[in-house]
Image: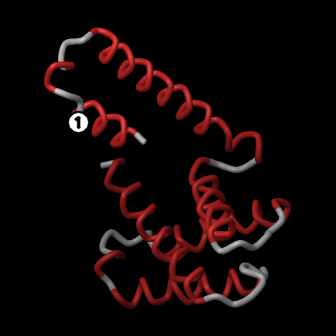
Amino acid sequence: MFKAIVDKYNDRKEQDVLVSNVLEDFTDEIIDLHESLKKEKASFADLGIDFEEKAFYDIMKAIAKKYDFEYPDEKLIPLSKAVKDVVDDKTKYTDWDNREDIKAEMKVDLIMLLAENGYPPITHDDVYKEIFEQAQNFKKYRSETRV
């Protein structure tokens, strides 16, 4: 979202560079984004999960919407916690993202966990692939931002 705001600002017309309403609009959009991020960051507490579990919850919720299937929240919340546990277990090694054996184990463990919990309700390889990729990317980039 931030990138879209910056791109919009950078793509403005040259004659609008110093126009005050363009700068005010940009500032308002940045403030709105900041407020929505603060609200989103606090939203996990309402669900009884931590920030990383909420990320996996959001990932699986978005995938369910994308692939047009329902999965109840009362099952999705504990599943999000379990997915985080699997990912944390497999990514505890510093070189996990360079080791194919660890990534393969994580993929198998995630597929088994999801299947045991009926997510998705109908087997769909693209769903498993997307969750694995999202989990891998989340953990990889989350680790880089903490360094």
Taking the image as shown, residue 60 lies to the left or right of residue 71, namely left
Q: Indicate the position of residue 5 as horizontal and vertical percent values.
A: 36, 35
Q: Point out the residue furthest to the left here.
A: 14
Q: Quadrant of the N terminus?
A: top left
The residue sitting at the top extreme is 20
Looking at the image, how many numbered discs can be counted on the residues?
1
* Residue 67, position as x, y percentages in the image: 65, 74
Residue at (79, 69) in percent of width and height? 71
Foreground: 79 or 5?
Answer: 5
Q: Name the residue beneath numbered marker 1.
A: 11
Q: State which quadrant residue 138 falls in.
A: bottom left
Q: Nearer the viewer, residue 44 or 12?
A: 12
Q: Amino acid at mark 1?
A: Asp
* As drawn, 25 above or below 33: above
Left or right: 34, with 65 as reference point: left
Q: Is residue 83 above or below residue 108?
A: above
Describe residue 35's horizontal placement relative to residue 12 as left or right.
right
Choose between 110 and 58: the one closer to the eye. Answer: 58
For label 1, the crowd category at 10 Å Cα-Cα, with few meaning under 14, some 14 to 19 and many 20 or more, is few
Residue 146, image x and y in percent?
Answer: 36, 48
Q: How is the image coloured?
A: secondary structure
Give the residue drawn at x 33%, y 42%.
3
Question: In the rendering, at what x and y percent does residue 8 appear?
Answer: 31, 35
Q: Residue at x 59, y 47 (%)?
A: 51
Callout 1: SS: loop
Q: Is residue 47 above or below residue 135?
A: above
- Above or below residue 16? Residue 96 is below
Residue visible at 68% across and 69% down? 64
